[in-house]
């Protein structure tokens, strides 16, 4: 969106786990239990990713920062790179909807494509529409893990709203509705950044 590259720490970590890199092996236990991966691992991962050429035209961080110390580290990373953070977008959704969205998500083992049992079901149950690969429910999309992730969010991530509000960077949108409605809200909230 807006010509910026999306940087999803979750995607990067899952790839590292699948590839069994040293980082992936270190992070695997945390990811599968729903706990946050240690700040030092995530911060280094993001710092390296932001050095890649495709970030030169802008980037959107997805899943980072998740703690105040990560936010402070991000401030330092950006300062050293001569960059500034333009905005933090918070998409507000109830816990019940979060559980419904995550627990129904299915991922293709072959191509990584996503579907959802209720909102975007595959043509054939358990089979990816894109490549015919097997669809499965990731461990971090199971209800018990989601419940734990929500508890972690409340204690460690929710305080970020105040952190960024005090800096005048927080923009909040309603995340309930059809995909196109939510997309329109995102564009409206971020629109002045690309004009």
Image (cartoon, rainbow, N blue to C red):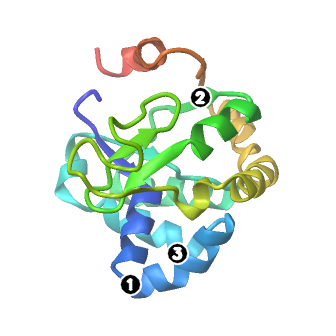
Label 2 sits on residue: 91
Residue sticking out furthest to the left: 53
User: Can you give x and y, in whole percent of width and height, for residue 61 in the image?
Assistant: 43, 46
Q: Nearer the viewer, mark 1 or mark 2?
A: 1
Label 1 sits on residue: 20
The reply to whether dot 1 and dot 2 touch (C-beta < 8 Å) is no
Q: Earlier in the sequence, mark 3 or mark 2?
A: 3
Label 3 sits on residue: 41
Q: What residue do we see at 54% from left, 77% from top?
A: 27
Judge whether residue 98 can be spotted in this image. Answer: yes
Badge 3 marks a residue whose secondary structure is: helix
Judge whether residue 84 can be spotted in this image. Answer: no
The answer to which of 27 and 90 lies nearer the viewer is: 27
In the rendered structure, the answer to whether residue 95 lies left or right of residue 115 reads right
The answer to which of 160 and 79 lies nearer the viewer is: 160
- The residues bearing labels 3 and 2 have C-alpha atoms spaced at a distance of 25 Å
Residue sticking out furthest to the bottom: 22
Quarter of image, res 149 = bottom right
């Amino acid at each position: 969106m807006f010509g910026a590259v999306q940087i999803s720490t979750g995607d990067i970590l899952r790839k590292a786990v699948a590839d069994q890199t040293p980082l992936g092996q270190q992070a695997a236990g945390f990811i599968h239990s729903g706990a946050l991966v240690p700040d030092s691992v995530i911060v280094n991962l993001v710092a390296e990713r932001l050095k890649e050429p495709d970030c030169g035209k802008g980037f959107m961080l997805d899943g980072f920062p998740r703690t105040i110390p990560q936010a402070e580290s991000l401030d330092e990373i950006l300062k050293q790179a001569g960059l500034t953070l333009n905005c933090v977008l918070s998409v507000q959704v109830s816990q019940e909807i979060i559980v419904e969205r995550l627990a129904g998500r299915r991922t293709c083992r072959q191509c990584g494509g996503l579907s959802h049992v209720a909102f975007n079901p595959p043509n054939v149950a358990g089979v990816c529409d894109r490549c015919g690969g097997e669809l499965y429910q990731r461990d971090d999309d199971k209800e018990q893990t989601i419940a734990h992730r929500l508890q972690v969010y409340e204690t460690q991530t929710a305080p970020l709203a105040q952190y960024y509000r005090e800096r005048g960077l927080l923009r909040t949108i309603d995340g309930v509705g059809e995909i196109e409605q939510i997309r329109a809200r995102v564009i409206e909230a971020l629109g002045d950044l690309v004009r």
